[in-house]
Amino acid sequence: MTELNSTELNSAGLIRLSAAQLAAKLAAREVTSVEVTQAYLDRIAAVDGQVNAFLHVNTEEALAVAAEVDAIRAAGGAAAEELHELAGVPIAVKDLIVTIGQPTTAGSRILEGWHSPYDATVIKKLRAAKMPILGKTNLDEFAMGSSTEHSAYGPTRNPWDLDRIPGGSGGGSAAAVAAFEAPLALGTDTGGSIRQPGAVTGTVGMKPTYGAVSRYGAIAMASSLDQIGPVSRTVLDSALLQEVIGGHDPFDSTSLTDPFDNLVAAARTGNVTGMKIGIIKELHGEGYQAGVENRFNESLELLKEAGAEIVEVSCPNFKYALGAYYLIMPSEVSSNLAKFDGVRFGMRVLPKDGPLTIERVMAATRAAGFGAEVKRRIILGTYALSAGYYDAYYGSAQKVRTLIQRDFDAAFAQADVLISPTAPTTAFKLGEKLDDPLAMYLNDVATIPANMAGIPGLSLPGGLADEDGLPVGIQLLAPAREDARLYRVGAVLESLLEEKWGGPLLAQAPALGSTSTTAGGSN
Ligand code: GLN
């Protein structure tokens, strides 16, 4: 990204810097963390009434952490030198991740007003790095959805067009970053909830390898698929954040022991020369919007010009991925959400009449506390797991999962990295798919395979679709544990695309808070 000159370091300029740029300015003491954090809090106050990205704003604590970082830097010496590179850079957190001192709702009425007694591991790591936490972001209830319209607290709106969805389930995190309400955010991705919101808001979203980032303290949706990851405006920023939150955690039994400490270096030394990049035949073309397809083809051309070899691979079992996901995911959901029983957490509703038994309290609480989409999935999952149907549904879906993993193995024997559009369309209108669950589910057709196989996936902005001028996402996939490879390729593609557009894509987003459509970006 182009640097701003120092005369532009007012709050409007500050909020448009990348996290890496902010970190450099903080280290050089050109700005203070209090100035940066206050600029973001002011931005939230100015525009979040329109966007609804935040469910909770953590003003006091964020400013206190910022002041602490500033004091350490001002004092100098060993303590200042030991500060993490991102110390003082603020961040927003998806409200599925538990935090001491702030409410955690999971976007559900059932957890309204609930406070976690402990911090998620990723939150502990943000605190250790002294990154001020700006607040908690909106999401589809328990991360189930592709539009953030299933939140019990109202939908988040897409900063590119306030009548459109910001993707989901992590629409709040993506919209916050796209609307310059935060430089960084945390998301969770079970079937695409980091990457698809990234695609439709023109931001970067990374689902790390399953187990690369601890899930301890992320309220579980489907445990064999869930993964926490970074949301940012640049590829380098995601790499910086993944290095903060990643690493082994004894509190998560699926946590990998690999250090994943080569990510920032990979993002800084982007290179694709001699690399084989595989187009997944089944993940573009028919069913994909023409403008999405055009931007996808353009990215392929750029990568080819930069020295990569483009090959085509086929993953024939991907056509079953969505079907298998909608058996495995709800099965795990039905089990994971059994703990919201009106006894242990949050809301308790007593039955209006009749005997006061535990079963009846549970039923009344769950009937009042869960929204329609959550109930749909619990019922679906309970059915798929029931005696007599288990083998036919859950068992078959697990076999499909193995076939998807084998398709990836075969594809990665032919290519170093795979590429596809992240989502079949650009952001659709609020309400457009709300009454049609199957149409909603189709948004994740290109993102779900990565969760089924546990491999990493990165979405980055690929330009604006010709027909509607809305952001298009490009998805890169690598074998498990090869997260660094995604950052290496992603950084190259990002810089080639920025060269083509004359700067970051988000600079072309319309300004919020006015009806003007002039560029909102300043660099
Ligand atoms: N949109 C997908 C779903 O509704 C993915 C959700 C997610 O990744 N949390 O299941």
Image (spheres, helix red, strand yellow):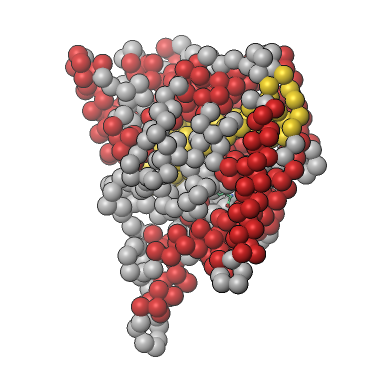
| 170 versus 410 height, above or below | below
Which percent across, then down, holds residue 81? 26, 16
| 367 versus 428 height, above or below | below
Which percent across, then down, holds residue 305? 72, 14
* Relative horizontal placement of residue 444, taking residue 49 as reference (left or right): right
Which percent across, then down, holds residue 235? 53, 25
Instruction: Point out the residue furthest to the bottom here.
Output: 354
* Relative horizontal placement of residue 94, taking residue 315 as reference (left or right): left
* Label total for image: 0
| 155 versus 234 height, above or below | below
Could you tell me which residue is drawn at 19 percent across and 14 percent down?
77
Could you tell me which residue is drawn at 26 percent across and 19 percent down?
82
Please say whether residue 287 is visible from this viewpoint.
yes
Q: Nearer the viewer, residue 226 or 235?
A: 226
> Which picture quadrant has residue 9?
top left
* Relative horizontal placement of residue 197, taking residue 26 as reference (left or right): right
Could you tell me which residue is drawn at 33 percent across and 69 percent down?
343
- Work out which quarter of the rendered image holds the C terminus and state it: top right
Q: Nearer the viewer, residue 149 or 162?
A: 149
Which percent across, then down, holds residue 345? 34, 62
> Which picture quadrant has residue 195?
top right
Please say whether residue 245 is visible from this viewpoint.
no
Q: Nearer the viewer, residue 463 or 41?
A: 463
* Relative horizontal placement of residue 432, taking residue 90 as reference (left or right): right
Could you tell me which residue is drawn at 80 percent across and 42 percent down?
286
